[in-house]
Amino acid sequence: MGAVFKTDAVTGYRRMFYIVSPNETSFKFVEDVPKYIDEASVYFLTLIALEYLVAYLEGKKSIFRLADSITSITAGMFLVVSDFVVKGFDIAVYSWIYENYRLLNLPWDNAWTWLICLFGIDLGYYWCHRMAHEVNFIWAAHQVHHSSEDYNLSTALRQCCTEVFYIPLAPIIPPAIMLVHIEFNLIFQFWVHTQVVDKLGPLEYILNTPSHHRVHHGRNRYCIDKNYAGVFIIWDRMFGTFTPEKEPVVFGLVHPLQTWEPITVQLCHLKYMWHKIWEFETFSDKVAFIFKGPGWEPGKPRLGLIEDIPDIHHPQPKFDTFLPTWCKFYVGFHFLVSFLVLDAFVNIFEVGLTALAAALGIFYIIYTMTCIGHICDGTWYAPWMELIRCSLVLVATTSLKEDLMRVTDLDDAFIQGVRGVFFISMLLWLPHLLKTRENKEKLK
Ligand SMILES: [Zn+2]
Ligand SMILES: [Zn+2]
């Protein structure tokens, strides 16, 4: 198996809470920095399972819904996929600025460098995050993270973060140290996405905690544009954006989505902006619409008016769809398969893949998750999409079998097994294709 099992359990769980020493996490070169986020993925999943168990025992299992959790984890998988393309570019630009225009020569192997950068990156995160809420076109990317109406550890994986926002720190912070802290900053934010941990006493003064971050995900009026912290809540306290958890939080976007389909989840706000921008008459209003807050309109302050936010209180109805039990198992199983394929893909990618193989792998992940989203939505053409997907896997595992065996450890028997599973999956959808046609005819 791949990157997920590269660390021992104690180290793995320690890293989830940023409990690491400068010694073990200081590197001279970017290439030497381990893929901490990839290595953390198995610990993410075990903590999600633990949270589910605790929630179940406390009678709160309704905080988890299969389709919602899958949509969240899918966003995290898309991030891993997009990193294949983007991450190298971000780091290359950052490193180039550091090499040519650095103002300081901080020694990479000094504990003070590590500590200063810990706070520097966290302060940088605060402002990036605040900008992501206050600048409409950046919000178009960040809204993905806020689009879940549930709030649990899987919500944390609805991420969209890119190193490009840290480029202003390039003249000061060495690239490898920057990368280490960005990864740990992001990993630390995983555990704060939970409702099973209450307030944490004195830690609430210093750290970003589950209670503080619940407020950040709220759509009650008192929660809007509050608590941007990554690791330390001190920045919100310093810059006037802190508010404690008061009444129960209603989670999600001010205008919640009505779909589980992951591409729509990613692009919905961009689509909204594209339609909306033509309504503005002057060029300056169009520019202001792009760069001011998502709630801005001509004549209103930069971030809009709080009175425009619906005055809601817990509890509120959530978007939901019905899935038969067999379908829940089906979706869960194929989701798990895709997760393992992605993990294997990450490792093979390091070894080196042809452009065609890389493109096929990325297509498989994105198309599979789109199919699963449509099944969860109950879209009428979801069975057709799934039939095509299973057929493509059967064709690919036949025609590319030799290549597959060469770049992976898989043997012939395993590939035959995979083919059998996808063949049965294909058969499962046949009756539903007919049903779909019958339903459509009835509708006519
Ligand atoms: Zn946010
Ligand atoms: Zn969050």
Image (cartoon, helix red, strand yellow):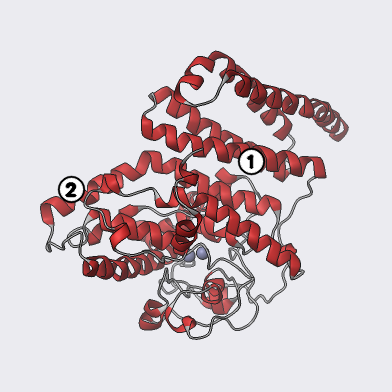
Q: How far apart are labels 2 and 1 at the CA level?
A: 39 Å
Q: Determine the image quadrant of residue 301.
A: bottom left
Q: Residue at x 63, y 55 (%)?
A: 257
Residue position marked by numbered label 2 in the rendering: 96
| 327 lies above or below 242 | above
Percent of width and height locating residue 30: 26, 48
> Any mark on residue 335, and which?
1
Percent of width and height locating residue 164: 31, 53
Does the image show residue 252? yes
Task: Judge the density around disc 2: few (<14), some (14-19), many (≥20) Cα neighbours within 10 Å.
Answer: some
Residue at disc 1, secondary structure? helix
Could you tell me the amino acid type at mark 1?
Phe
**Quadrant of the snapshot with the C terminus:** top right
| 203 lies above or below 250 | below
Q: Residue at x 56, y 38 (%)?
A: 340
Does the image show residue 282? no
Left or right side of 58 for 275: left
Residue at disc 2, secondary structure? helix
Residue farthest to the right? 442
| Marks 2 and 1, the one that precedes in the sequence | 2
